[in-house]
Image (spheres, rainbow, N blue to C red):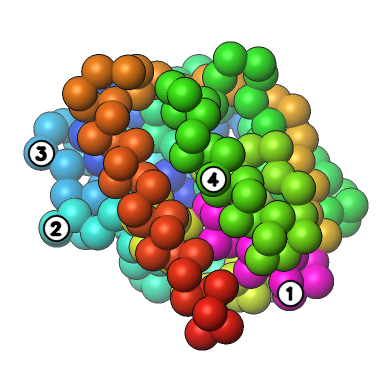
């Protein structure tokens, strides 16, 4: 029997792109259900997601990326395989079969998307390099895409890495915890893309928050508290 696969999409103010993302995810033959966790959006994200065929959970107030995912998981029944996807992938979410296949086929326990060249960066690459360095130091794993939110993992792997780190530290911490737990982690190229944060004031503010939340997730792991 085929495993039950649920795609979980944390979203905040993504009304303009989430419809296309959901349509692409629902078209994946491996995916049984798409669930959006609306993280305190103040636009039409939830209504667009519902109209596009996703189940929608709302946090009520902003929880941050990791908090939204963790909160959604607590409210959902189990799945055999989970697919985490960013809300702004649009139609390129159709390429996420690339990470589902090795997990469904039993070749990996956690599969992470490697973006095409020029995609998935943070502008100057400083946050990405720092996250990759932290993963290498704490687990020995050399991550090409330490910040990629596009991941497929088994139910057992998910339990091994919970509770998830809050905010934008969720991916870096998840990789560290998964490698330390002895699960098989692979990175897989996929033709996905998302909205660039750019190098303006908003982009720098986003990367500053991202760096802080990664540090807050990494520190307890470096100190042996997680």
For the residues labelled 4 and 2, the Cα–Cα distance comes to 29 Å
The circle drawn on residue 130 is: 4
The quadrant in which the N terminus is found is bottom right
**In which quadrant of the rendered view does residue 106 lie?**
bottom right
State the image coordinates of residue 107 (x, y, percent, origin top left). Answer: 89, 52
Q: Residues within 10 Å of mark 1 (few under 14, many from 20)?
A: few
Q: Is residue 220 left or right of residue 129?
A: left
82 shown above or below 18: below
Find out whether residue 63 is within the magenta segment: no
Depth order, front residue of 220/109: 220
The quadrant in which the C terminus is found is bottom right
Tell me what residue is drawn at x 36 percent, y 45 percent.
210
Report which residue position mark 2 lands on: 61
Q: Earlier in the sequence, mark 1 or mark 3?
A: 3
What is the number of callouts on the image? 4
Q: Is residue 164 left or right of residue 17?
A: right
Q: Are marks 4 and 2 in contact (CB under 8 Å)?
A: no
Q: Mark 4: which secondary structure?
A: helix
Give the magenta-colored segment's residue range. 171-183
């Amino acid at each position: 029997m085929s495993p039950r696969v649920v795609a979980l999409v944390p979203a905040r103010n993504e009304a303009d792109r989430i419809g296309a993302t959901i349509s692409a995810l629902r078209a994946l033959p491996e995916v049984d259900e798409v669930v959006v966790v609306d993280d305190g959006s103040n636009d039409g994200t939830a209504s667009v997601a519902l109209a596009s065929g996703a189940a929608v959970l709302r946090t009520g107030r902003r929880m941050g990326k990791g908090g939204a995912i963790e909160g959604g998981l607590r409210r959902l029944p189990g799945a055999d395989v989970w697919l985490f996807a960013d809300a702004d992938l649009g139609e390129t979410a159709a390429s996420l079969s690339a990470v589902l296949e090795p997990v469904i086929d039993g070749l990996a326990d956690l599969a992470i998307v490697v973006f095409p060249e020029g995609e998935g960066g943070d502008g100057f690459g400083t946050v990405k390099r720092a996250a990759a360095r932290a993963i290498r130091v704490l687990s020995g794993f050399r991550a090409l895409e330490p910040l990629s939110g596009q991941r497929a993992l088994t139910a057992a792997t998910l339990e091994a890495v919970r509770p998830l780190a809050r905010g934008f530290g969720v991916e870096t911490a998840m990789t560290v915890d998964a490698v330390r737990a002895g699960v098989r982690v692979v990175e897989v190229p996929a033709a996905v893309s998302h909205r660039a944060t750019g190098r303006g004031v908003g982009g720098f503010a986003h990367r500053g928050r991202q760096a802080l939340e990664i540090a807050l997730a990494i520190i307890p792991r470096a100190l042996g508290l997680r």
